[in-house]
Image (cartoon, helix red, strand yellow):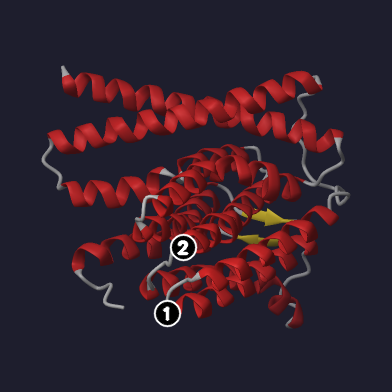
Amino acid sequence: MEVFLSILMLIIGLGLLNYGSDWFILGNTTIARYFKLSNFVIGATIVAFGTSLPELVTTLYAAYKGLPMIAVGNALGSCIVNIGFVLGLCALIYPIVIRQRFIVKNVQIYFLYSVLLTVLGYDGFDFIDGVILFLLFLGYLAYTLKKRSIITEEKRDKRNIPMVLAVIFIIVGLLSIFVGSKLFIDGARHIALLLGVPEKVIGFTLVAFGTSLPEIAVSISAIRRRLGDIVIGNVVGSNMMNIGCALALSSIITYIPPTRFELLINLLFVTLTVLFINKGIVLKLFNRDNSEHFKIDRVEGLILLGLYLVYVLSYYLGWSVF
């Protein structure tokens, strides 16, 4: 009976994640059209904030309860999941095409922010580090919103719905994503326990992966609609939110001990993402590519996904020695 209920929770959770993410994307793209926002801006702000709420709430609560390692593990671990798993999987489904140089510059800013994060966090994060990260995050948000009028040739969802209905879709979609995430995690946890999987393994994989389920659901929904800018915006925006808001505010509340292995892994993923996106510039220099677009193709998505799996396995093989 318990197995049946757990499987039912998994199925219902996946259904809510699927339909909820579709509604959420449809509502957001409608609002983007109405306010003349670009897909990237809507993804890096509204969508990113909505999908990052689980990480934000969980991280701040952990810091408040005096659990700094859970706080940093959730915030930083979610960043790694977002690039390694989410971005990698989306690129495998369909190449992520970026049509505007502004987005490329935004990703480069995120890279510099990640370098600073690694330097500041080498000996842990204290109050000053948190203030610096938070203020820079506010600057990034202001810079992104200044580009709200960039709309040009982006591919839009052709379904036209009233603004009120779009807001309802966003609210219902976001609630469905959160409820679906909880059902999916609880169902998977119960099945794992019944199968005898160790509690430590369950906690690490489901907590780190589980809080990123909203990003996964929304990004997959977006890439199915060929909205690569929303995928990039969601991943970059969510990661900036995880670092500049969740991790920064947590370090203001309590001292965060150093996690050098995770910081280096995070920087590796961010560096690869920047290199993949900017490879078009190098190809142009050698007259190998005349395209005006930047993209992450399927091979690069497979590299990101493969490295993420190696990262996860490293925990259980005892490679994380930093």
- How far across and how far down the image is residue 225, in percent? 65, 37
Kind of residue sitting beneath label 2: Leu
Q: How many residues crowd mark 1 within 10 Å: few (<14), some (14–19), many (20+)?
A: few
In this view of the protein, which residue sits in the foreground, 132 or 197?
132
Q: What is the secondary structure assignment of the residue under circle 2? A: helix
Q: How many residues crowd mark 2 within 10 Å: few (<14), some (14–19), many (20+)?
A: many
Q: Dividing the picture into quarters, in which one does residue 322 lie? A: bottom left
Give the distance between the C-alpha atoms of the residues marked 2 and 1, in whole angstroms: 27 Å
- How far across and how far down the image is residue 303, in percent? 45, 64
Q: Which residue is mark 2?
A: 304
For the point 20% across and 51% down, the residue is 200
In this view of the protein, which residue sits in the foreground, 116 or 289?
116
In this view of the protein, which residue sits in the foreground, 293 or 131?
131
- Horizontally, residue 187 falls left or right of residue 111, namely left
Q: Does any portion of residue 83 appear in the rendered image?
A: no
Q: Dividing the picture into quarters, in which one does residue 195 lie? A: top left
30 above or below 5? Answer: below
- Horizontally, residue 320 falls left or right of residue 46, namely left
In this view of the protein, which residue sits in the foreground, 282 or 112?
112
